[in-house]
């Protein structure tokens, strides 16, 4: 049930949505569901051959209208071109999903300054470039658009070994909340975010969970499911359902929110005693007796 499409047919009809990084992974899955719900979708990222292949597949799979446009989100003028081409093609733009990202695991002291830059620039600069270009257009045209940013749960906790990504996602979260108030009040533009836990994609898995390089034992020990109370990874349709809801008018009163979809992962890491999940049921009676004894 949880991996079934959730919204009613036509829920996004009449909307044109830009999905950055929409050629692969979670961006592709969100784009696909938006198309199924009647939206026009623009997918934008660096690799035109990947975008074109995805656009063809999505057209066949959904019958919807999808426009691939190559751009580097770090370059403001390329971002403005994406917007202009989208307006020329579809007449208007109503939604923006800032999903493009760069990331890899590394001890921070092994990073060069360029290694730090590349991740922060794709994630933070890429997001504010698109947000600024599209926001200025909405304000000029009096369009009450919707922005949805894909962050991570370590945007608020921080995380070792992905420090550039953590810093950049924290910045994106700050932009989300700041504009929810500023542009919400003045222009009716909504800003929200989704913080996913582990959802298998080639892009993330190759760079964050390189099983072969880590070896069998270490990768089994470190597998994402070991940290998730619900003991599974996320399914793309679950995230697409949430994203479509946040991009639709059904969520009109949700503004400035970040919705976590991680099976409880980050809280398990945060809770002082969460690792007591490891204690077998039969041991609890013995523990209770010992603790009560001490209390007397
Ligand atoms: C250390 C590295 C490195 C690595 C690159 N660099 N990879 N340093 N360890 N693994 C350094 C390079 O040496 C170089 O610095 C600088 O970073 C730029 O590298 P390039 O290869 O020239 O960059 P580029 O070709 O632009 O590629 C960008 C990228 C790449 C971020 C490095 O991985 C990419 O294209 N990623 C896009 C997709 C992606 O990352 N998807 C995953 C998102 S998942 P020097 O000094 O040598 O020049 C995600 C989920 C999080 O965010 C949460 C999961 C639960
Ligand atoms: P992915 O498939 O690698 O997606 C990243 C996308 O960003 C790619 O399509 C890539 O396309 C695009 N991109 C990278 N650099 C770009 C640039 N400079 N300009 C424009 N586009 C660029 O990985 P994913 O797992 O689906 O990640 C999608 C989003 O979910 C990211 O924001 C990520 O942080 C977030 N997330 C994922 C997980 C997970 O478990 N998968 C968990 C938490 C958060 P090109 O290479 O063509 O540019």
Image (cartoon, helix red, strand yellow):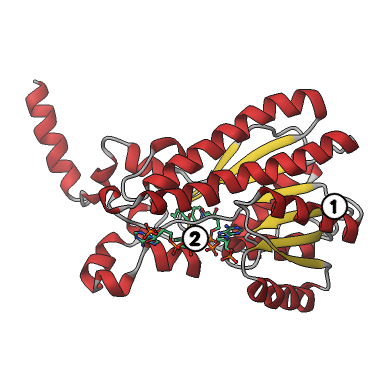
Residue with the most extreme right position: 91
Secondary element at tag 1:
loop
Looking at mark 2, is its residue's CB closer than 8 Å to ligand 2? Answer: yes
In the depicted structure, whether residue 219 falls above or below residue 20: below
Question: What is the CA distance from the residue labelled 2 to the residue labelled 1?
Answer: 27 Å
Residue 200 visible in rendering = no
How far across and how far down the image is residue 229, in percent?
A: 38, 51
Q: Residue at x 24, y 72 (%)?
A: 215
How far across and how far down the image is residue 216, in percent?
A: 24, 73
Name the image quarter holding residue 53: bottom right
Instruction: Choose the circle earlier in sequence order: 2 or 1.
Output: 1
Position of 90 compared to 262: left or right? Answer: right
In the image shown, does 43 or 250 lie closer to the viewer?
A: 43
Position of 211 compared to 145: left or right? Answer: left
How far across and how far down the image is residue 296, in percent?
A: 8, 20
Name the image quarter holding residue 29: bottom right
Q: Which residue is mark 1?
A: 15
Q: Residue at x 54, y 52 (%)?
A: 122
Secondary element at tag 2:
loop
Position of 169 compared to 55: left or right? Answer: left
Ligand 1: quadrant of the figure: bottom left
Disc number at residue 199? Answer: 2
In the image shown, does 86 or 115 lie closer to the viewer?
A: 115
Foreground mark, 2 or 1, reads: 1
In the image shown, does 286 or 207 lie closer to the viewer?
A: 207
How far across and how far down the image is residue 151, in percent?
A: 53, 46
Looking at mark 1, is its residue's CB closer than 8 Å to ligand 2? Answer: no
Q: Dot 1: within a 10 Å radius of its alpha carbon, few (fewer than 14), some, or many (20 or more) residues?
A: many
Q: Residue at x 60, y 67 (%)?
A: 24
Position of 276 compared to 84: left or right? Answer: left
In the image shown, does 37 or 72 lie closer to the viewer?
A: 72
Q: Dot 2: within a 10 Å radius of its alpha carbon, few (fewer than 14), some, or many (20 or more) residues?
A: many
């Amino acid at each position: 049930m949880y991996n079934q499409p959730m919204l009613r047919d036509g829920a996004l009809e009449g909307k044109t949505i830009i999905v950055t990084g929409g050629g692969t992974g979670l961006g592709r899955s969100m784009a696909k569901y938006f198309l199924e719900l009647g939206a026009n979708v623009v997918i934008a990222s660096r690799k035109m051959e990947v975008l074109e292949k995805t656009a063809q597949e999505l057209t066949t799979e959904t019958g919807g209208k999808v426009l691939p446009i190559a751009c580097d989100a770090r370059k403001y003028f390329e971002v403005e071109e994406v917007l202009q081409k989208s307006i020329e093609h579809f007449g208007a733009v109503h939604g923006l999903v800032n999903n493009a990202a760069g990331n890899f695991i590394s001890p921070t002291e092994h990073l060069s300054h360029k290694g730090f830059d590349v991740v922060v620039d794709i994630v933070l600069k890429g997001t504010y470039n698109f947000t600024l270009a599209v926001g200025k257009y909405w304000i000029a045209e009096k369009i009450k658009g919707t922005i949805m940013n894909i962050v991570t749960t370590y945007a608020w906790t921080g995380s070792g070994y992905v420090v550039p990504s953590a810093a950049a996602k924290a910045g994106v979260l700050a932009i989300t909340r700041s504009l929810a108030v500023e542009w919400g009040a003045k222009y009716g533009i909504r800003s929200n975010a989704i913080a996913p836990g582990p959802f298998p994609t080639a892009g993330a898995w190759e760079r964050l969970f390189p099983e072969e390089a880590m070896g069998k034992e270490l990768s089994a020990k470190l597998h994402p499911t070991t940290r998730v109370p619900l003991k599974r990874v996320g399914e793309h349709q679950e995230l697409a359902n949430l994203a479509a809801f946040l991009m639709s008018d059904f969520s009109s009163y949700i503004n400035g929110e970040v919705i976590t979809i991680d099976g409880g992962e980050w809280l398990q890491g945060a809770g002082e005693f969460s690792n007591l999940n490891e204690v077998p049921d039969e041991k609890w009676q013995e523990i209770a007796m010992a603790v009560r004894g001490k209390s007397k």
